[in-house]
Amino acid sequence: MENLRPNSANPKADLNYRRKKNAEEMRYQVVSFALMIFLTLIAFAVVHFEGFSHWFVAPFIMLLAVVQVIFQLYYFMHMSHKGHETPQLFLFSGLSVALITVLTFVTITWI
Amino acid sequence: MASVQEKFTEMTWPSSPEKATLEAKNKFLGFWFFLGGETVLFGSLFATYLALKDKVPDSSHPLAKDLYSMDLTFAATMLLLTSSLTSVYAMYHMKNFNFQRMQAWLLITVLLGAAFLGLEIYEFNHYVHEGHKFTSSAFGSAFYSLVGFHGGHVAFGLLWILSLMVRNAKRGLDLYNAPKFYVASLYWHFIDVVWVFIFTVVYLMGMVG
């Protein structure tokens, strides 16, 4: 592993650099958490207000959910990092089957 | 390739311990494959719920808009969302080779998850008293299958994280257990991803009507 061989004469330099990078990433994580909470608050507020039409509320809160899940997947689950090409293939394959199933059940089933 | 048995210090700890060994790389890929399968599973449960929502035999049965409470759903959502952030903090300390702090944040994650599960049990018990049962209607079966399956995942995740914490309490961090902690945190985030759709599709859309 390249990170086991620090390329500086000062062995602490590599550690300090990595600490700083980790702390920086953690800041981004906290920012994405704040955004996720904000999106959740909007979704609950829109439903709580009751003044909007059903035809606006349903697609709007769905959109908020999708944006929030993108934050969750790409930041919290690190899918934005390098080396996540195969996880993306797995997840999006699963997602496409899931979406087709949902589409089928809400359109061509009747009970 | 780093060795699994090697004793590390914060100086020698790799920057991506979750992918530093062959076993870790395999675990990482295998787990994402599993998450792809879980997506299909929950997709079919969501599809069933959407098709059977409010399908009850007669008007004596409560419908979605009569049952769901915004306060309870909001509290559960905040608990689970926050627990997702606390497990990110745990992985942050894992990458910094700080075992004690990682354990502490994992414990907070478990406590938040347990509080979420407590709320869910209270909620289900309340619904059963309102006449909304697993066997009372197609709506009831679909609801408890979807939300119950998610709750089951939460319960399993709690047991998983707790077992990792207890089993490795004396060992400390190494390349044998770092990938295990990482994969458990991925699972926990996935549970949160599913909950985002549950609170939107089931609860909020149910309240809208």
Image (tube, coloured by chain):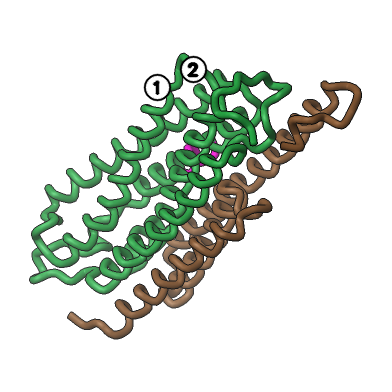
Chain colours: A brown, B green
Q: Residue B171 has which mark? A: 2
To which chain does the residue with label 1 belong?
Answer: B
Point 40% across, 72% down: residue: A97
Which part of the image, by quadrant, shows the C terminus of chain A? bottom left
**What segment carries the magenta color?**
B81-85
Q: Is residue B36 left or right of residue B142?
A: right
Q: Secondary structure at mark 2?
A: loop
Question: How far across and down, in percent of the image, does residue B176 sit?
Answer: 51, 29
Point 88% across, 22% down: residue: A10
Q: Are marks 1 and 2 in contact (CB under 8 Å)?
A: yes
Q: Which residue is mark 1?
A: B167
Question: How far across and down, in percent of the image, does residue A91 sit?
Answer: 49, 61
Point 71% across, 35% down: residue: A22
Q: Are marks 1 and 2 on the same chain?
A: yes
- Work out whether residue B37 or residue B93 is closer to the camera in this orientation and state it: B37
Q: Amino acid at mark 2?
A: Arg
- Work out whether residue B35 or residue A111 is closer to the camera in this orientation and state it: B35
